[in-house]
Image (tube, rainbow, N blue to C red):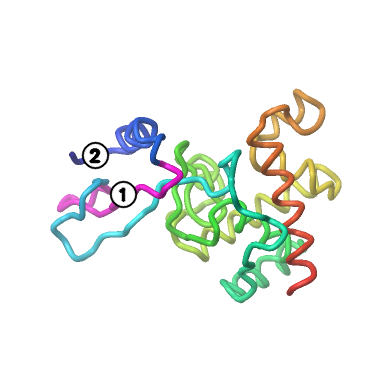
């Protein structure tokens, strides 16, 4: 079965949601006409990108112990530090968000269509001028910019920043705080733990 457009890709994601957390593989490639296409089997071309469907931070019953799980202190250091300095935000927070969002997998793709290291939705990526969300440098740059804006908006309150990053600013406004969504509440907790750990280890 081949999926030739983003709409069909998203349909595939939802129909395979039972498997999504185990990392379903999708292959992205360009057709002869230069159109981005997707398939669940390796295409007959040497130029394609493997993408994994899953959401590392979305498992409500995750067996990961966030207090002692392995940290990624040396991954994408140059880009993270550069963007942290550029947007005047804590590099430990960027690492915490990347860890919670994608487990530092630049090929990550969520069931809702969020892409790359910092799990940017296509609309957000477009708004931030990103052409390829699976490119680590572009993704970190855009995600850091988005994170910095949320930090300014919520006065540095990392709990609200994390909640808005996960559930959206509208949800935070509606509930005047962290929304009562189990996924978001777990996400906020994980980012807080990871942030403190990265602060102590980088």
The residues colored magenta run: 20-37
Which residue is drawn at the image coordinates 84% and 46% (left, top)? 157
Element at badge 1? strand
Q: Is residue 165 left or right of residue 46?
A: right
Residue projecting furthest to the top: 174
Mark 2 surroundings: few (<14), some (14-19) or many (≥20) residues within 10 A: some
Picture coordinates of residue 47 (x, y %)?
23, 64
Give whichever of 22, 175 is nearer the camera.
22
Residue at the disc numbered 2: 3
Check residue 30 for magenta coloring. Answer: yes
Residue projecting furthest to the front: 63
Mark 1 surroundings: few (<14), some (14-19) or many (≥20) residues within 10 A: many
Which residue is drawn at the image coordinates 19% and 51% (left, top)? 31
Q: Quick check: 186 above or below 174?
A: below
Picture coordinates of residue 181 (x, y %)?
67, 29
Which residue is drawn at the image coordinates 57% and 72% (left, top)? 75
Q: Quick check: 60 above or below 44?
A: above
Element at badge 2? strand
Disc 1 to disc 2, C-alpha distance: 10 Å
Picture coordinates of residue 71 (x, y %)?
64, 67
Check residue 125 for magenta coloring. Answer: no
Q: Determine which quarter of the picture holds residue 127.
A: top right
Residue at the disc numbered 1: 26
- Tag 1–tag 2 contact (CB < 8 Å): yes
Which residue is drawn at the image coordinates 51% and 42% (left, top)? 121
Q: Determine which quarter of the picture holds residue 46.
A: bottom left
Picture coordinates of residue 5 (x, y %)?
28, 38
Q: Quadrant of the N terminus?
A: top left
Q: Quadrant of the C terminus?
A: bottom right
Q: How many marks?
A: 2
């Amino acid at each position: 079965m081949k999926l030739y457009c983003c709409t069909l890709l998203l349909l595939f994601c939802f129909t395979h949601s039972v498997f999504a957390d185990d990392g379903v593989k999708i292959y992205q490639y360009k057709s002869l006409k230069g159109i981005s296409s997707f398939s669940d089997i390796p295409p007959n071309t040497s130029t394609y990108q493997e993408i994994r469907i899953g959401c590392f931070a979305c498992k409500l019953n995750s067996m990961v112990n966030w207090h002692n799980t392995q940290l990624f202190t040396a991954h994408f250091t140059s880009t993270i530090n550069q963007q942290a300095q550029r947007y005047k935000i804590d590099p430990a927070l960027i690492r915490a968000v990347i860890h919670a969002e994608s487990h530092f997998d630049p090929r990550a793709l969520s069931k809702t269509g969020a892409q790359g290291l910092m799990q940017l939705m296509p609309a957000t990526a477009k708004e931030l001028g990103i052409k390829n969300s699976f490119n680590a440098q572009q993704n970190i740059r855009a995600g850091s910019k988005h994170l910095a804006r949320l930090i300014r908006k919520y006065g540095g309150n990392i709990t609200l920043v994390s909640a808005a990053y996960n559930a959206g600013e509208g949800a935070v406004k509606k509930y005047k705080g962290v929304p009562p969504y189990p996924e978001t509440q777990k996400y906020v907790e994980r980012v807080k733990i990871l942030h403190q750990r990265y602060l102590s280890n980088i």
